[in-house]
Image (cartoon, grey):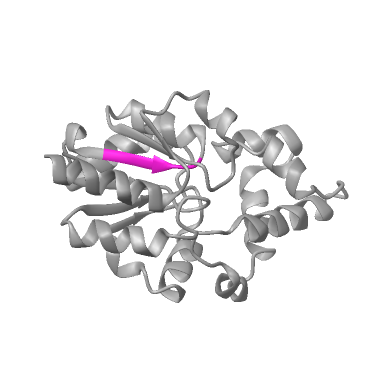
Amino acid sequence: MIRNLILDWSGTLADDLSAVITATNGVMTHFEKPSLSREEFRNIFRLPYTEFYRDILPDVPLMDLQALYLKHFPEDDQHAVPMIEHAQDFLQFAADTGRRMFVCSSAPLEHVRAQAEVNAVHHYFEHLHCGIVDKCSHVHEILTQHGLRPEETAFIGDMRHDIHAGKAGGLTTIATATGYESVPTLMLAEPDILVQNLSALTRLMRSLTVGA
């Protein structure tokens, strides 16, 4: 039985794609590069995000890029970042069924914390692991720090890197088709489970619980 959930934030729980594109285009404009359309961004964005920036701005130090990104993603925009549809209901279901929940995200901690508080979901999580560049390495730290058994833990995300991280930790991997990567792209990572959205995942987990 899956007793623990490690959840990506952006595109899995929070609908922040528009805000992220705005911040990224702020960085692009600073360096006199053309802005990216939503489709262009989704086609080229990848994790770890260091590789994405190495592709588009190879000569700029990462610390400079991070500072500019934060500058163009002001705190006021956190109020414009809603939860993905069905996310809050899924979190409530997971809490009601006694599952432990953790966030593992490349997004800055201040962004995730602010968005979680604005959307009144912060209380669902035991810990927010944020600003994580390489989730494949960090997943082991999460398991050790919180005493999680891999066979009882699932990693839920909307990008291949999330699935790769779950596999690196020996976890059940669940891809949700609500975020940054298309289904064909997600399936390249061969997740154990693919769901259309978190409502479908709630139904699946409920049926597995009943059948247990």
172 over 133 or under it: above or below: above
Tell me: 95 left or right of 61: left
Q: In this view, does 123 lie to the left or right of 26?
A: left
Please tell me in which quadrant of the rendered image residue 13 appears.
bottom left
Q: What stretch is highlighted in magenta?
A: 154-158
Q: Out of 64 and 6, give the one closest to the viewer.
A: 6
Work out which residue is located at the far left of the displayed protein and give it: 212
Give the x, y percent position of residue 64.
67, 51
Q: In this view, does 165 lie above or below 92?
A: above
Residue 45, x across and y down, in percent: 65, 39
Instruction: Look at the image and tell me in which quarter the C terminus lies.
Output: top left
Specify whether residue 197 is in view.
yes
Number of numbered callouts drawn:
0
Q: In this view, does 58 lie to the left or right of 153?
A: right
Residue occupying image coordinates x 72% and y 59%: 22
Q: Viewer-proximal residue, 187 or 22?
A: 187
Where residue 32 appears, as percent x and y from the top left, is: 88, 50
The answer to whether residue 47 is magenta is no
Q: Residue at x 60, y 72 (%)?
A: 80
Q: Where is residue 76 in the image (x, y as percent from the top left)?
A: 61, 76
Q: Which quadrant of the figure has residue 167?
A: top left
